[in-house]
Image (tube, rainbow, N blue to C red):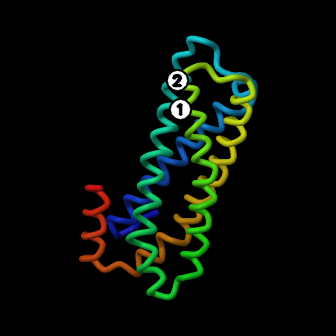
Amino acid sequence: MDFQRQTNKRLYEEHAATLQLLGRVERVFTGRAGAYPPAAGDAEWPAFARTLLLAIEVEVARHFEFEERDLFPRLEEAGDGDLVALLNEEHATIRAVAEPLAGLLRQTLAGEPAPAQWQTMKTLALEFSERLGSHAQKEDGALLPVLENLLDEDTDRDLFGAYASG
């Protein structure tokens, strides 16, 4: 998509990176590779788990907080409260899956996961992937076009600066 606003471009790029990571989540947790805990000494698993944990704890959290704090109030003032309510509801649903998933990722990084933990983590990871992927696509199709028309150049510059430094 071709956005003129820096804030929109940044959010769109983050959505694209998130969708790419979610593709990896799907590959890791499905099929035979996802049916069993990783083998002891598997060097790829800890690297992947740290990447996913960082995405949950930092990138997704930061992204959601920025939207809720700096964008959603502007949308509500402009009469787009229904969109804000939907996106806030999705944020809450995604967080409800992300929190226990992050906890299990931390546990597995501290030691080897038990098969029951692996199955729970697999279920949570796939639900997280589905919900966050759908949410990112919804924001690309609904939120960003609204913001493109709502933000003026000065507001965009201020928002982008605050987000980039935060």
User: Could you say where residue 128 lies in the image, as x and y percent from the top left?
Assistant: 63, 48
Question: Of residues 87 and 103, which is closer to you in this image?
Answer: 103
User: Could you say where residue 117 lies in the image, as x and y percent from the top left?
Assistant: 70, 30
User: Could you say where residue 48 lies in the image, as x and y percent from the top left?
Assistant: 52, 29
User: Which three-letter amino acid code belongs to the residue tagged 2?
Assistant: Ala
Q: Which mark is residue 134?
A: none
- Gap in angstroms between the C-alphas marked 1 and 2: 6 Å
Relative to 153, is 115 on the left or the right?
A: right
- Which element type, helix, strand or loop, lies under badge 1? helix
The answer to whether 23 is drawn above or below residue 87 in the figure is above
- Which element type, helix, strand or loop, lies under badge 2? helix
- Say which quarter of the image contains residue 40: top right
Q: 10 Å neighbourhood of mark 1: few (<14), some, or many (≥20)?
A: some
Residue behind mark 2 = 110
Q: Residue at x 43, y 75 (%)?
A: 147
User: Which three-letter amino acid code belongs to the residue tagged 1?
Assistant: Arg
The answer to the question of whether label 1 and label 2 lie on touching residues, with beta carbons closer than 8 A, is yes
Q: Which mark is residue 106?
A: 1
